């Protein structure tokens, strides 16, 4: 006999089975279904980098906005935290503009510090992506320059010519511009200036063709 315990007659006893015994086969426990597994920092930044550190809905990017990771298929609908189910979204697009009034719900100092740190890290990531893009375009410009004037990456080229090449690469893509440079070089005009002008005429013709096609 346990001292202090109240004895209950068997016919008056009430047995409460465990929650798992009340569920039908295959039915998940409610408290388990509401659990939300957090997305790791590494996965979040992999998603940001894949999406160019820009909101997939409106195109906004740091430092103008703070980026979030959004689920393509919501967790409540069976979606998971796989990277293919995640996209970059700015705070307004993800949360809804005006969803949270910061005047009504003030941030703590810790929240403010965490937000500043997140903004700073996102800005560094965005700047890194843009720097990699700039370096890639610079390499493409010099490839075209070398096709027009062999040795120009070492010997140099006129700044205004390089700017024109950069513009054409942006409008047509490096492969179209390289083809135009190769065509102009093999025209055999025996003059860098005449070769470059012929190259420009080819590129402008292709730009106009693209505009008419669209």
Image (tube, rainbow, N blue to C red):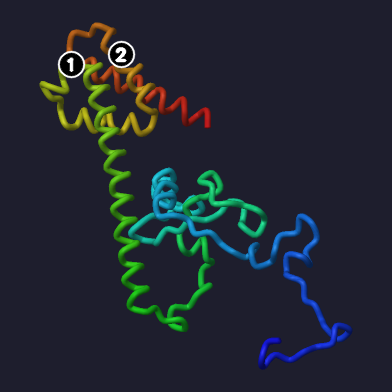
Q: Secondary structure at mark 1?
A: helix
Q: Secondary structure at mark 2?
A: helix
Q: Is residue 152 left or right of residue 122?
A: left
Identify the mark at residue 182; answer none if there is no mark: 2
- Residue name at image x 33 percent, y 61 percent: 119
The residue that appears at 80% across and 88% down in the rendered structure is 8
Which mark is drawn over residue 157? none
Residue under the image location 78 percent in, 64 percent down: 23
Would residue 157 be found to the left or right of residue 32 on screen?
Answer: left
- Of 24 and 210, the residue lying toward us: 24
Location of residue 67 in the rendering, given as x and y in whole percent from the top left corner: 42, 58
In this view, which residue lies farthest toward the left?
155
Q: Residue at x 44, y 45 (%)?
A: 51
Q: Height in image: 49 above or below 97? A: above
Quadrant in which the N terminus appears: bottom right
45 vs 93, nearest the viewer: 45
Q: Residue 175, image x and y in percent?
A: 37, 22
Q: How busy is the neighbourhood of tag 2: few (under 14 within 10 Å), some, or many (20 plus)?
A: some
Q: CA distance from mark 1 to mark 2?
A: 13 Å
Left or right side of 108 for 96: right
In this picture, is 3 found above or below 75?
A: below
- Residue 150 in which image quadrant: top left
Residue 3 x, y percent position in the rendering: 66, 91
Q: Which residue is tagged 1?
A: 192
């Amino acid at each position: 006999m346990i001292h202090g315990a109240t004895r209950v007659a068997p016919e008056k006893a009430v047995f409460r089975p465990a929650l798992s015994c009340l569920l039908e086969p295959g039915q998940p426990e409610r408290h388990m279904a509401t659990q939300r597994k957090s997305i790791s920092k590494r996965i979040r930044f992999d998603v940001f980098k894949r999406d160019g550190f820009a909101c997939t809905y409106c195109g906004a990017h740091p430092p103008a906005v703070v980026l979030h990771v959004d689920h393509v298929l919501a967790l409540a609908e069976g979606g998971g935290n796989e990277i293919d189910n995640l996209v970059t979204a700015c705070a307004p697009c993800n949360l809804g503009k005006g969803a949270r009034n910061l005047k009504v719900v003030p941030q703590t100092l810790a929240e403010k510090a965490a937000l500043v740190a997140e903004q700073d890290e996102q800005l560094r990531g965005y700047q890194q992506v843009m720097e990699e893009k700039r370096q890639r375009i610079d390499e493409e410009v010099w490839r075209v320059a070398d096709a027009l004037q062999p040795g120009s990456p070492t010997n140099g080229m006129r700044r205004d010519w390089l700017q024109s090449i950069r513009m054409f690469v942006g409008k047509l893509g490096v492969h179209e511009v390289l083809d135009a440079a190769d065509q102009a070089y093999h025209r055999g005009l025996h003059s860098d200036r005449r070769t470059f002008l012929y190259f420009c005429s080819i590129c402008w013709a292709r730009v106009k063709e693209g505009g008419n096609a669209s």
